[in-house]
Image (tube, rainbow, N blue to C red):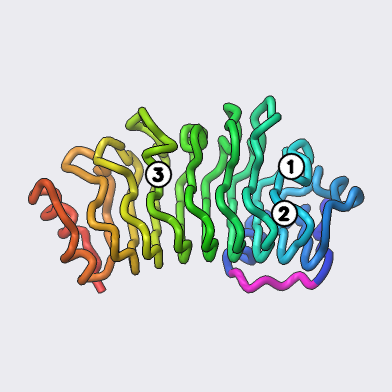
């Protein structure tokens, strides 16, 4: 049995939401302008591959719907849910969760402070490939402690118009980070992040799969986490000419190498 169910007005202003639902069109569930946790919807959620939570009220986190009800979820899209402060509360979780989730898109969630709160059990988010964060003005950390190690499949990361973000990978949350984290990341897009000062604190990460970075309106970002030995597959580096000219370098050879890949505007 397959189903497509929308409770409320199904339209969304987010193109990522429409695109992602096309990716997993069967067994999709959208809750729009609804409230709380409906037991009937939980039964559908257990069989849902694509879940959209749009302008929903009465929940402060996605895990309020019960982690065991989301075991089959491939796509999760959250938009305009202004009571949500974190996506997952890991306290009390004793096994990996969201093991099948491949796409997570969060848009216009005004009170969101973190994606994951508390401990991250091994196996959680193990298949996540695409993470998009947009218009979350209170979001301060993307990868909480222990989360980044659980993302071996992450290929695409986009962070846009999140005004409190200062670091993409926070040093305080990731002490002793191994060099081979995010081994599958191919695309990194950072747009309109006025407080961003760091992608990672130094050039110790390998970035073995990174092919494309795009950075725009991140004027406080003065250093890139690359050297002559890492990010060897990088082919496209897009950014603003004024921003590129203000970057600081420890090694002129690295600047020359990356400049040859630049598309400046």
Q: Position of residue 109 (x, y in %)?
A: 61, 62
Q: Secondary structure at mark 2?
A: strand
Which mark is on residue 51? 2
User: Residue 166 placed where, x, y %?
Assistant: 39, 54
Look at mark 3 in the image and give the residue it sits on.
169
Q: Considering only order in the chain, which callout, 1 or 2, is on the residue closer to the N terminus?
A: 2
Upstream in the sequence, badge 3 or badge 2?
A: 2
Q: In the structure shown, which secondary structural element does the residue marked by tag 1 occupy?
A: helix
Q: Gap between marks 1 and 3, in whole Å?
A: 27 Å
Q: Hey, which residue is sitting farthest right in the picture?
A: 40
Choose top left, top right, bottom left or bottom right for residue 248.
Answer: bottom left
Under circle 3, the secondary element is loop
Residue 164 colored magenta? no
User: Magenta stretch containing residue 13, yes or no?
Assistant: yes
**240 relative to 99, above or below:** below
120 relative position to 252: left or right: right
Residue that mark 1 sits on: 70
Callout 3: 10 Å neighbours few (<14), some, many (20+)?
A: many
Q: Is residue 162 left or right of residue 40?
A: left
Given this view, does label 3 or label 2 mark the residue nearer the observer? 3
Q: Residue furthest left?
A: 252
| Alpha-carbon span between mark 2 and mark 1 | 9 Å
Name the residue at 45% across, 47% down. Answer: 155
**Spatial separation of the CA atoms under disc 3 and disc 2:** 27 Å
Write the start and end of the magenta stretch as one range: 9-14
């Amino acid at each position: 049995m397959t189903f497509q169910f929308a409770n409320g007005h199904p339209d969304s202003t987010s193109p990522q939401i429409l695109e992602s639902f096309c990716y997993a069109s069967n067994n999709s569930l959208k809750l729009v302008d609804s409230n709380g946790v409906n037991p009937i919807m939980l039964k559908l959620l257990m069989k849902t591959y694509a879940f959209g939570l749009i302008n929903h009220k009465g929940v402060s986190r996605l895990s309020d719907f019960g982690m065991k009800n989301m075991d089959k979820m491939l796509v999760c899209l959250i938009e305009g849910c202004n009571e949500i402060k974190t996506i997952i509360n890991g306290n009390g979780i004793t096994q990996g969760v969201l093991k099948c989730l491949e796409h997570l898109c969060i848009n216009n969630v005004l009170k969101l402070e973190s994606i994951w709160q508390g401990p991250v059990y091994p196996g959680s988010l193990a298949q996540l490939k695409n993470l998009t964060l947009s218009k979350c003005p209170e979001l301060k950390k993307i990868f909480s402690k222990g989360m980044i190690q659980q993302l071996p499949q992450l290929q695409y990361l986009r962070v846009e118009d999140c005004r409190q973000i200062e670091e993409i990978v926070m040093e305080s949350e990731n002490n002793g980070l191994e060099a081979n984290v995010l081994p599958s990341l191919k695309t990194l897009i950072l747009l309109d992040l006025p407080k961003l000062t760091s992608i990672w604190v130094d050039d110790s990460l390998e970035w073995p799969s990174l092919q494309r970075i795009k950075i725009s309106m991140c004027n406080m970002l003065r250093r890139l986490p690359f050297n002559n030995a890492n990010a060897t597959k990088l082919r496209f580096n897009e950014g603003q000419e004024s921003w590129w000219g203000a970057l600081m370098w420890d090694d002129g050879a690295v600047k020359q190498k990356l400049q040859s890949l630049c598309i400046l505007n």
